[in-house]
Image (cartoon, grey):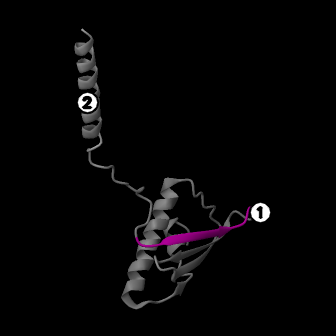
Amino acid sequence: MKKQFIALCVSLTLSFVTLSVFAQEKAPRTYRASKWAPERGYWVVESNIHTPKHSVITFYNDKGAMLYKELVDGVRLNLKKRKTLMRLKRVLDQSVTAWEGNHPVKENESLVAAAFGKN
């Protein structure tokens, strides 16, 4: 009886070990960024708590070169809203595309204001 109990314990231990090994062989989860997360650059929003409707938005590429800079007046940018982030992403994509064409550093062409409906 004792030998059967030991054999049962050993076989159960081995089966648990093999099951745990097979459970870890699943494909690793791939990281999926948010839809608003840019693939080819980033932006920096500079604003003041005392003047929330006055912001300076600067767009950069992956290497840190400035692509575009705009002063936005009359619009309070709520960076917690997905809609705002998607609009900034769209302007960043336009800036990166223009930069890849002929490397101009632009300023105040109202791209952000147009994205937010202010002209």
Marking on residue 91: none
The reply to whether discs 1 and 2 touch (Cβ–Cβ < 8 Å) is no
Say left or right for 84 vs 38.
right
Q: Is residue 61 above or below residue 14?
A: below
Quadrant of the rendered structure where residue 33 is? Answer: bottom left
Q: Residue at x 28, y 20 (%)?
A: 9
Disc 1, SS: loop
Q: Amino acid at mark 1?
A: His
Residue 73 in the image, given as x and y percentages of width and height: 65, 70
Which residue is located at x 30 percent, y 42 percent?
Answer: 24
Separation of residues labelled 1 and 2 (CA atoms): 66 Å
In this rendering, the label closer to the viewer, 1 or 2: 2
Residue positioned 37% across, 54% down in the render: 32
Q: How many neighbours does mark 2 have within 10 angstroms: few (below 14), some (14-19), or many (20 or more)?
A: few
Tell me the SS state at disc 2: helix
Residue situated in front as seen by the camera: 78 or 118: 78
Q: Residues within 10 Å of mark 1 (few under 14, many from 20)?
A: few
- Towards the viewer: 96 or 53: 96
Residue at horizontal 24 percent and vertical 39 percent from the top? 22
> Residue 71: x percent and y percent?
62, 76
Q: Which residues are magenta?
A: 40-49
Mark 2 belongs to which amino acid?
Leu
User: Looking at the figure, which quarter contains the N terminus?
Assistant: top left
Q: Which residue is mark 1?
A: 50
Q: Which residue is mark 2?
A: 14
**Main SS type for the magenta part?**
strand
> From the viewer's perspective, is residue 4 above or below residue 85?
above
